[in-house]
Image (tube, rainbow, N blue to C red):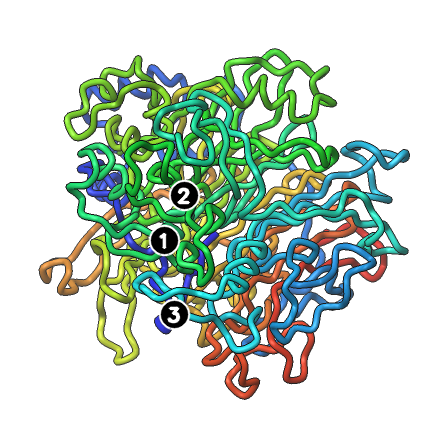
Amino acid sequence: MSKNYAPKRRFVDPDEVSHNTSNNDSFEQVLNRARMGRRGFLKGSSSLAAASMLGTGLAFLVDTVKHDGQVATAATDLRLSFAPVAKSIADTLTVPAGYTARVLLATGDPLKSNVTPYKNNGMDNDFEVRAGDHHDAMHYFGMNQAGNGWDANGVDRALLCINHEVCEDLGFVHPNGPTNYGQESTSSRPSMEIDKEVAAHGVTIVEITKQGSTYQVNQNSRYNRRVTALTEMEISGPAKGSSMLVTAFSPTGEKTRGTLNNCANGYTPWGTYLTCEENWAGYFHRREADTARTEKEVASFKRYGIGNATSGRYNWSMADKTNTDVYRRWDTNKTGSTPTQDFRNVSNTFGWVVEIDPFNIDVTPKKRTAIGRFAHEGCWPAKAVAGQPLVFYSGDDSRNEYVYKFVSTAVWDSRDATGGIAAGNKYLDAGILYAAKFNDDGTGEWLPLTMNNPKITSYASYTFADQADILINARLAADAVGATKMDRPEWGGVNPVNGDVYMTLTNNVSSSSGRGVRTPLNAANPRYYADAKGSTVSKGNVNGHIIRWKEAGNNHAATTFVWDIYLFGAKVDASPDINLSGLTDENDFSSPDGLWFSEATPGLLWVQTDDGYYTDKTNCMMLAAIPGAVGDGGTKMVTNKSVPINNNADQTVMTRMGQQANPAALRRFLVGPRDCEITGITESPDGKVIFVNIQHPGENSESATDPSKFTSHWPDGGTSRPRSATVVITRNDGGKIAL
């Protein structure tokens, strides 16, 4: 996930800049058109036909949604047992009474016993053997008793795979902060700084062992290693060998180096890890006239946000020593006579889902191109069912982007559960990528992104050459088929109790720099935002919400679904037109981001925040929830008083939503230290230990070296530089977490 800054920021948040200029409907427009009551909603034969074809009730027309004659409910006897944690702006990590949180692995901590302790003063230069920076998504892979393979029920030993999204923008990893970086820089940078930042990206794989009720890192494990922005990767799937992936490093278009901006994640039924590349587009140097490239190349660059006057986020292509391919590979300019002589195509080798086998240190990670290229927030699996295709859901985390799912060609065979990355070749290299369209009547469609779709082949704005072109330019393909623009799709998950799919839409706020097109206030999140002076202005959906859907027939490979909105974020003291879900002091939140369903406790949902619009009252947080089911709520008419962006006209819209929030089924479990983001969660198979990541505490500090200007000193305290970290949370009485 990406940063969701408060107004003060060091860089423009790439998620807040919209690169979608298509005429596709936004989710707000979908809801805006539904301005009628229940009785009037099904007027017209097209809506009736849609309901008939689906064979399902519409989520907001009946009190429950019926599928195959059964009421779709989240049948569970779960009860939250902890006292809600209060909101806080203190520089500490707060968990409920009766729980303990311990730091397991922080930025720079050694992965091997022969590596020196981290000095945390910028002098350590060996991040290849240390935990990376900006801890993000992670997953627990239990180990068998022999310690040489995966065991989904393994409690005593496990491999923990941890994403590292970026290297801290303030440069806490450097002695005096960073030298000459930024998107507009034209100056060279010390190669030592670049090497450290490259190594701080990627993934950490580390063995953990049970010690009493908690876990510790086993620094003597042969499995401990880093996968970084320099690690060699294989390209697999339909785009492998495409001329659009040819570089000086890989003249055949079958390899690349590095994975970066590793945000959310996924996992497979065969025990491998899926790490996802989100804001990769901001890393590349491109300073050339558009006329130097083909019309299609320029269209692709613009759609993914790679301008022609940028040095990249970190200026990695401009090292102060001989410009070898290690640095030149970040330069996407056309400098040679052929693609095999430069890196003009290098950005096309990023933006993918990367499969890593944590138990096989000799296997090269693979970029699975069948799942599409965009700002991958994650890749979340539906339950594997024998004889049925595997399904993975993804969000494209940027303003006005889309929701996707991948359906494998091969059907699941449980004998592949021990197949390792070879099983990925079978299930992840062939299938259909779909983009979601949310219809006005509460139904939805999955639109195939294939050459068999006439909307793809007849698209006037871009001519797709083949399936590889579609997958490399998945955003353009989704534009072509008419997918629905969403409010920054972030994390997703599938409720194991009833199969409902959830996805956080963190907000739709344009960058404070003014870049991008503002999204008008509307029924998708029908609330106004008051600025510091108290005037009413529209900044779009600032607090975010969580959408959910039910696939037709509860079959995740289906091509139709019904949907509603589970929760709207808001401050507790906001007006009813803003606090639509009736949040209370025990559970109010803003900008939902991380989302994860427990496997040890089916039906238990965790929601994490990355907020910049409630920081006057609280740091980011994590909430525990016991959600219901699609269609368990109703409708609500909301009248928004006029604001200038709405041309001084009131807006009356209908919102479809889940049940009102009740502290019995939604309450705050954790509040992080100052300026952090709560992101990443996994658990032990018995549900008695959870692991949570605290990312970028103190990111709004005014200095990387002056402790008096740090806004956080977590986790080490005193005058220390802040660090991201993975924490282990246990219940003092040894019971299951949250229940």
Kind of residue at disc 3: Arg
Which disc, if any, is residue 15? 1
Q: Is residue 599 above or below residue 184?
A: above
Lower sequence index among marks 2 and 3: 3
Label 2 with label 3: CB-CB less than 8 Å: no
| Number of other residues with Cα within 10 Å of mark 3, as a class: few under 14, some 14 to 19, many 20 or more | few
Residue 558: name its quadrant. Answer: top left
Pick the front one: 589 or 320: 320
Would residue 649 be found to the left or right of residue 141 on screen? Answer: left
| Number of other residues with Cα within 10 Å of mark 1, as a class: few under 14, some 14 to 19, many 20 or more | many
Q: Is residue 549 above or below residue 727?
A: above
Q: Which residue is mark 3?
A: 10
Pick the front one: 634 or 362: 362
Lower sequence index among marks 1 and 2: 1
Task: Give how far across and how far down residue 337 sits, in percent.
Answer: 28, 34
Question: Label 1's element?
Answer: helix
Label 1 with label 2: CB-CB less than 8 Å: yes
Kind of residue at disc 1: Asp
Residue 65 visible (yes or no): no
Task: Give how far across and how far down residue 425 sits, in percent.
Answer: 58, 20
Which disc, if any, is residue 375? 2
Residue at 66% x, 60% y: name it: 126
Question: Label 2's element?
Answer: loop
User: Label 3 vs label 1: CA separation?
Assistant: 14 Å
